[in-house]
Every structure is written in C-alpha cells, then in structure tokens.
Image (tube, rainbow, N blue to C red):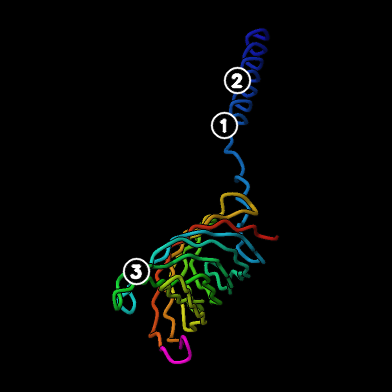
Amino acid sequence: MKRTLLGSIVTIAILAAANAALGADMRMPGPLPAAPFFSWTGLYMGVHGGYGWSTSQGLDLKGGFGGGQIGYNFQMNNFVFGIEGDVAGADISQSVNGIAFGVPVSAKFSNDTLASLRGRFGVTFSNVLVYGTAGGGWGHGKLSGTALGLTVSDEQWHAGWSAGAGLEWAFMPNWSAKFEYLHYGLGSATYFNGGNFGNLDVDTVKVGVNYRFQ
C-alpha cells in the first residue's frame, strides 16, 4: 500500500513538473520594440538636374539645367512644412536662321538661369514625402542676333512665380532623393532699350539628391 501511494505521489509530481515546463515554453512573447520614428525636421541641402521647355511667344525653347538647393523642413505628425530656395544654370534655348534683305541672319533666345524661393507643404508616409510647392520664380534671359559677322545681344531678368509638386524618398537616415515638376510663370522684360519680350512660361522636371543635417 505504501509503495502504491508513494508511486502515485512520484507520478503526480513528475506530471506537474512537466506541465509547468510546457506552460513556460508556450508563454506569449512580450511586445516587439517599436520601430524608430523617422523625422523630416531639419536643414538640408543638395544638388539637382533636369530638363525644361517653353512655347511662350511662339518660341520652342528646350534644354537642360543643373544646380543646387537649400531648405528647412518642420514635421508635425504626418504633415511637413518647409521653405526651399534653389538656383540652376541652364541652356533652355532656341536658335533660328533666315534671310533678311538678302543677308543671312540668325537669332537666339536662351534662358540661362532659373531660380526660385518657395514654401513646401506635404504629407509623409514614414520615409516618403509627397508635397506641393509654390512661391517666387526668376529666369535670366539672353537675346542675341548675328548678321554680316556682327553679333549684338542683351540680357534681362524675368520675375514672376513658380509652383509644382514632387516626391521625396529618404533612402538613408541622412540622404534623400527627389523627383519634382515645377512651372515658372515669368513676367515680361525689355530688351535693347525698347523691344518688349512678353511673359515667359517655363516647365521643368528635375531629379535631385539632398543631405539632411540631423
């Protein structure tokens, strides 16, 4: 009898220990650590390049440009506010050739500089930012003509506005790449002390890279 009781007690103890060990193995794991919060807030600067075109005033301007930008973002929840300035050297131009009074002549108009200072407002999905942008815009134009081996030229600034939209992707903690469309609505300018060149609209697409100081 004693042996039977002792055997039962040992069996119950073994089963209890095994059940406790199994329960410990099946406990739910604790909560996973939260992913680090990505912030767009801060100063950034970078470079860009792109392509521009215009059919203003009956022209057919087109060509490339490249330059740099600097800006600052402030993030509030999923919204990003900021300001950005940029400037680029360009060769968005058209040349025409013809005959005037029996003399071969050529003329060229080029937009050799683009600049803007704009506000930005966007919505962020972690490390992806979709934004709209608008502000002031400037373009530097150069008008030249050649006849009988003689070339005359004049250059003026066209001032106006700029607006567009873009997408920026932070592919590393301090680096981001962007794609942006920007339209310049530039006012008229007077060339050769009397020749009024009307409003100039320029459309651009660009890609760029920014370094973000954090």
Q: Which residue is at the front of the view, 181 or 7?
A: 181
* Nearer-N-terminus badge (1/3): 1
Which residue type carries mark 3?
Answer: Val
Q: Which residue lies most toward the right here?
A: 214
Identify the secondary structure beneath mark 2.
helix
Q: For the residues marked 2 and 3, what is the alpha-carbon distance in whole angstroms?
A: 98 Å
Seen at 62% across and 19% down, the residue is 12
Q: Residues within 10 Å of mark 2 (few under 14, many from 20)?
A: few
Q: Which region is colored magenta?
A: 190-195
Magenta-drawn stretch contains 194: yes
Q: In the image, residue 111 lies at what x, y percent?
A: 47, 72
Question: Residue 26, which numbered label?
Answer: 1
In the image, which disc is placed on residue 15? Answer: 2
Left or right: 213 with respect to 158?
right
On the image, numbered disc 3 is attached to which residue? 96
Q: How far across and down, in percent of the image, does residue 129 sit?
A: 50, 61
Foreground: disc 1 or disc 3: 3
Check disc 2 and give the amino acid type. Leu
Badge 3: few (under 14), some or many (20 or more) residues near its Cα, within 10 Å? few
| 147 left or right, relative to 67 | left
For the point 64% across and 64% down, the residue is: 44
Q: Earlier in the sequence, mark 2 or mark 1?
A: 2
Closest to the camera, between mark 2 and mark 1, is 1
Tell me if residue 194 comes above or below residue 210 in the rendering. below
Q: Earlier in the sequence, mark 2 or mark 3?
A: 2
Which residue is drawn at the image coordinates 61% and 57% (left, top)? 37
